[in-house]
Image (cartoon, rainbow, N blue to C red):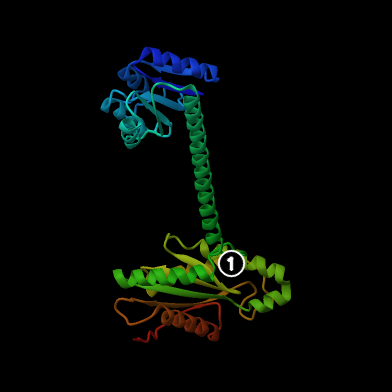
Amino acid sequence: MGVLVVDPNEVDLKIICDLLHQWGYHEIYAFNCLDAAEEKLMLHHSDRVMQAVFAIDIAIIDVTGGIPCYRMIERMRQSYLYQDVPVIAMSEHSRAEGMSSSFAYGASDFFSKPIEEYELKARVRAGIRLKYEIERRKARERELIEATNQLSDLNEVLSNLSLIDSLTGIPNRRCFDNTVDQEWRRAVRQGGHITFVMIDIDFFKQFNDTYGHQMGDKCLVDVAKAIKSQLRRPGDLLARYGGEEFAIVLPHTSAAQTEGLCQSIQEAIKGLMIPHESSKVDNHISISMGIASAQPSAQLLSAEALLKEADSALYEAKANGRNRFVISKDLKTTA
């Protein structure tokens, strides 16, 4: 328990120190000179180089000398090392003369000399209790900040999880819808193309009926990985749209630029060599794709309208024999 005592009156300084010893306070730092005390506390140094010379739990400072004494209290309040240390001001002047100025400069308590043992003891105990309360409050604040940060991190994790398909590990429909909205707005502001690709696994119901749902789930996972492996740009997004259907958002990409990607995706799916004896188009798993592309800033299209065009192109790919991709050419404008 560290107690700082500053009093130019040697007699009073000794009385205070002796009493503190009697009350069980043994770490007492006594100064009869204000400048010496400030130097030991390094109050004139920048906080960047300030180091704690000793731990102080309470300070008792004689302010009879006026402004210089009050300034010391003020500097303690401005220091991050001592700002929470309770300061008991004492003065040879009357209570009315010294108390208001002491409190104005940051003192926690005040008493007038001559020193009364019972009064000093009570004020020191009150100051120590105040110090403990400040420490407990700050510890609680730190706990609350840490808990808030942990909750924020947890919420972020939960938010991210809510955007991921639990089976395939790729973004889900909710994430796809959010991305479509963001990328569409960006394309309207900045110009350029945006392309949507709708993908469907051919005859997937028959695959489940033939091999079982467990193998069906594995097929979905493998197909998702194969498609994702062909997306090279950070802004491209593959999502599970629902069931056996996937969707891709391609910012800054035209329909012509998408053809090569769709060809590579088909090759990647073919390379999986997943048997599908119930398929009417191939002995292995295959996919159909519908592509729709537009320049939102130049065409009066909505994102929903373009998605419908991609879905129509997918339907056309299925109607024309599946295991292929079709690019929509019917981009109707809507107000």
Indicate left or right for 167 with 43 as reference.
Answer: right
Relative to 111, 200 lies left or right: right
What is the tally of numbered marks visible in this picture?
Answer: 1
Residue 45: % across, % down = 31, 26
* Picture layout, residue 279 above or below residue 274: below
- Indicate the position of residue 235 as horizontal and vertical percent values: 42, 62
Which residue shows up at 49% across the image and 35% down it?
A: 130
Q: Residue 112 sits in which quadrant?
A: top left
Comparing 235 with 206, the one in front is 235
Q: Which residue is mark 1?
A: 223
Q: Is residue 121 above or below residue 199?
A: above
Q: Closest to the observer: 307 or 108?
A: 108
Q: Residue at left 37%, top 33%?
A: 107
Note whether residue 103 is visible.
yes
State the residue lying farthest toward the left: 67
Question: Of residues 331 and 130, which is closer to you in this image?
Answer: 130
**SS at mark 1?**
helix
Residue 282 is situated, as x and y percent measured from the top left of the image, at 62, 76
Evaluate whether residue 257 shows in this view.
Answer: no
- The local crowd at label 1, few if under 14, some if 14 to 19, many if 20 or more residues have their Cα within 10 Å, is many
What residue is at 40 percent from the left and 21 percent from the top?
114
In this view, the residue in front, 242 or 66, is 66
Residue at (41%, 20%) from the top-left corner? Answer: 5
Where is residue 258 shown, x and y percent of the image? 42, 71
Query: Where on the picture, by quarter, is residue 185?
Result: bottom left
Type of amino acid under label 1? Val
Quadrant location, the C terminus: bottom left
